[in-house]
Every structure is written in C-alpha cells, then in structure tokens.
Image (spheres, rainbow, N blue to C red):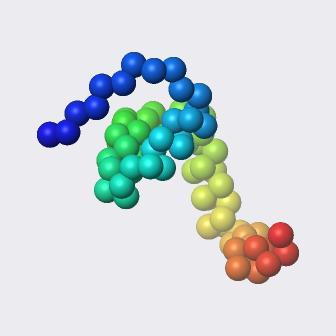
Amino acid sequence: METIKLNIDLSVNQLIEAVKQLSPKDRLKVNDAIWNEDIEIPVEHQKIVLDRMAKAKTNPERLLDWDKVSKTL
C-alpha cells in the first residue's frame, strides 16, 4: 500500500494542480474518496425534485429537448 504524508499549506488551485499530476488510476482514487461519502440531501431539496418530476409527468409538453436548447446557448 502506497502512503503519502503531507503537511503543507495549499490553495485549492495548487491542490488541483497537484492532483492533475497523478496517474489516471490515482485520480480516480481521489475522486472516489471525495464522492463516496454519505451525502444527505435536505428534505426541502428532495421535495423540490419530486415536485418537478410530478409536474413533468402531468405536463410533459413543458419540457424542452436538451439537444435543441443546447444549440441556442
């Protein structure tokens, strides 16, 4: 098992540049370590998403096609 011991002050940009120097395999490990945390989605946000999904089912013509919309951006 590889270990790295760091005790240095880095800005976010410096950290990003350091991570960019890693191999793709090690970048994925960093990504997994960051995003595999249990992240709680607030109930208020869940309600917003569920409400939007219900509106889309009830009124599908209100939705826009991403391919068409992205061309206008």
Where residue 43 appears, x then y in whole percent? Answer: 54, 34
Is 55 above or below relative to 73? Answer: above
Q: Quadrant of the N terminus?
A: top left
Where residue 72 appears, x then y in whole percent? Answer: 85, 75
Is residue 19 rendered to the left or right of residue 44? left
Q: Which of 59 and 15 is in front in this view?
A: 15
Q: In which quarter of the image is the C terminus?
A: bottom right
Q: Residue furthest right?
A: 72
> Residue visible at 33% across and 50% down?
26
Is residue 59 rendered to the left or right of residue 1? right
> Residue visible at 64% across and 45% down?
48
> Residue visible at 31% across and 56% down?
25
Where residue 56 appears, x then y in whole percent? Answer: 66, 65
Is residue 46 rendered to the left or right of residue 71? left
Camera sees residue 54: yes
Q: Which residue lies furthest to the left in this view?
A: 1
> Residue visible at 34% across and 40% down?
33
Examine the image and state in which quarter residue 67 appears.
Answer: bottom right
Is 59 above or below relative to 44? Answer: below
Is 64 above or below relative to 27? Answer: below
| Number of dots carrying numbers | 0
Camera sees residue 43: no
Q: Nearer the viewer, residue 43 or 20?
A: 20
Is residue 21 rendered to the left or right of residue 54? left
